[in-house]
Image (spheres, rainbow, N blue to C red):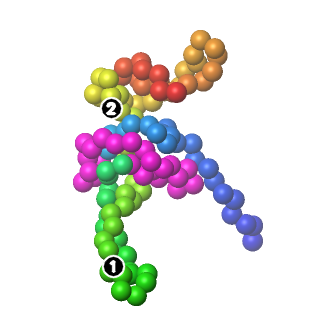
Amino acid sequence: MAKPTKVRHKMHVKKGDTVQVITGREKGKVGEVLRAFPETSKVVVKGVNVKTKHVKPQQEGESGQITTIEAPIHSSNVMLYSTKEKVASRVCYTFNSEGRKVRMLKKTGEIID
């Protein structure tokens, strides 16, 4: 049986992008992409899909604690967000004056990279 190859999906968002959640219980929230996982097409967005984790005490006498972490959400549930125009938009690819391929917001024409 053949060994499965690692598939890298091309995502429309990268680390550092400002995105808006478009579906689910977190719909409408805006945040920055902290991490991107191209293998599973998921992203971690600051302040979105926050889960609580109970951490056991490590040393004797130390008390346990409850920490909050952002869980990944699927990249198809987020849309790039323009902070200037305050609007979410689809992304398209175009070439800048130097001939480099860049991402651009369709609604505003704002270049991201």
Viewer-nearest of discs 2 and 1: 1
Residue 22, relative to residue 37: is it above or below? above
Percent of width and height locating residue 48: 32, 52
Residue contact between numbered discs 2 and 1, judged by CB atoms under 8 Å: no
Percent of width and height locating residue 46: 36, 49
Q: Work out whether residue 5 or residue 67 is closer to the camera in this orientation and state it.
A: 67
Is residue 108 at all visible to an observer of this figure? yes
The residue lying furthest to the bottom in this view is 60
Residue 32, relative to residue 54: is it above or below? above
Residue 71, relative to residue 111: is it above or below? below
Residue 73, relative to residue 32: is it above or below? below
Q: What's under tag 1, amino acid-wise?
A: Gly
For marks 2 and 1, give the CA distance. 41 Å
Query: Badge 2 local density, few (<14 within 10 Å), some, or many (20+)?
Result: many
Q: Work out whether residue 71 or residue 57 is closer to the camera in this orientation and state it.
A: 57
Q: Quadrant of the N terminus?
A: bottom right
What residue is pinned by disc 1?
Answer: 64
What residue is pinned by disc 2?
Answer: 88
Q: What's under tag 2, amino acid-wise?
A: Ala
Percent of width and height locating residue 60: 40, 88
The residue lying furthest to the right in this view is 2
Seen at 55% across and 25% down, the residue is 102
Q: Which residues are magenta?
A: 22-45
- Label 1 sits on a secondary structure element that is loop
> For the image shown, how many numbered marks are present on the structure?
2
N-term mark: 2 or 1: 1
Is residue 74 at all visible to an observer of this figure? no
Percent of width and height locating residue 78: 37, 43
Seen at 34% across and 71% down, the residue is 53
The residue lying furthest to the front in this view is 61
Query: Badge 1 local density, few (<14 within 10 Å), some, or many (20+)?
Result: few
